[in-house]
Amino acid sequence: MLPGLIYFIVYRYVPMLGNIIAFQDFNVFKGFLHSDWVGFKHFQKIFEDPEVLQVLWNTILLSFLQIVFAFPISIILALMLNEVRNEGFKRVVQSIVYLPHFLSWVVVVGLVTVLLKSDGIVNQFLQQAFGMESIPFMQSPGWFMPLIVLEVIWKESGWGTIIFLAALSGVNPDLYEAAVVDGANRWRQIWHITLPAIRSTIVILLILRLGSVLDVGFEQIFLMLNPFNKEVGEVLDTFVYFKGVQQSDFSFATAVGLFKSLVGLILVVGANRLAKRFGEQGIY
């Protein structure tokens, strides 16, 4: 356990001491101990600055879209693969769908850019097949969030499927045989046996996902941002980068990060209690 404990102490717990600069007007020359204390000044700014409110709304909306559209795809894929009886075909499909997880966001966004640029394959197909004009996918604010969600689905759904397939591997085959004897078709078996078998796993993963509801991923968003879609595409992660790194406003950036963590903690605790009230196991 020692390597794991050292990792969390050095990279998780020790850096938490730096959160004190969220309550200071931090000055790199004065340091942590001698910078001026300002209390909750930077936290008030989060709710008073119109730019921050817009960024917060973008983050919540994008996270909501990912939960609604991307999260269920892994469950659907797992259910579909569980119905495949040819083990060889099942393994090939499973490998194909989870391989994109190992690609970096730089590669994924690069592929999307090449495909969707003005003279890319997609626009050429639309022009030749339907006579449509070129669509500025990468510059259009209306296409930003759908593209982000589709990229997440393509890259991460296969990886999430592994967890649900692992949960399904523990289902007693006798349950399906008994259901067949009772006259249940495949849909009834999925509804009454397969889904209840992974219900607790779904709840746990959903609770953990709620904990990062304000964390929609820096790298992907940063690579997709441009001056045309920044108004609808900038999220808290990129905002903190621009404010904290480029403009050296370390105190405000830390306050936003601490705010994100607090919201995530409240959502995890609340969702866990709600799950237990409905008879689920929860995460603790």
Image (cartoon, rainbow, N blue to C red):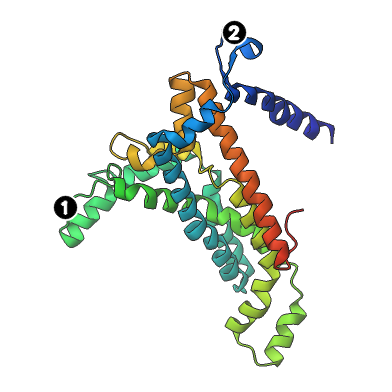
Task: Residue 87: tell me if it is visible.
Answer: yes
Q: Is residue 189 left or right of residue 174?
A: left
Q: Quadrant of the N terminus?
A: top right
The residue wearing badge 1 is 133
Residue at left 64%, top 47%? 266
Task: Give residue 172's position: percent from left, percent from top.
Answer: 77, 75
Count the marks.
Answer: 2
Task: Residue 166: tell me if it is visible.
Answer: no
Q: Earlier in the sequence, mark 2 or mark 1?
A: 2
Judged from the image, the secondary structure of the residue bearing numbered disc 1 is loop
Residue at left 74%, top 77%? 173
Cα separation, mark 2 vs mark 1, equals 58 Å
Of the two numbered discs 2 and 1 in the rendering, the one whose residue sits closer to the viewer: 2
Circles 2 and 1, Cβ within 8 Å, touching? The answer is no
Q: Is residue 116 left or right of residue 223?
A: left
The residue wearing badge 2 is 30
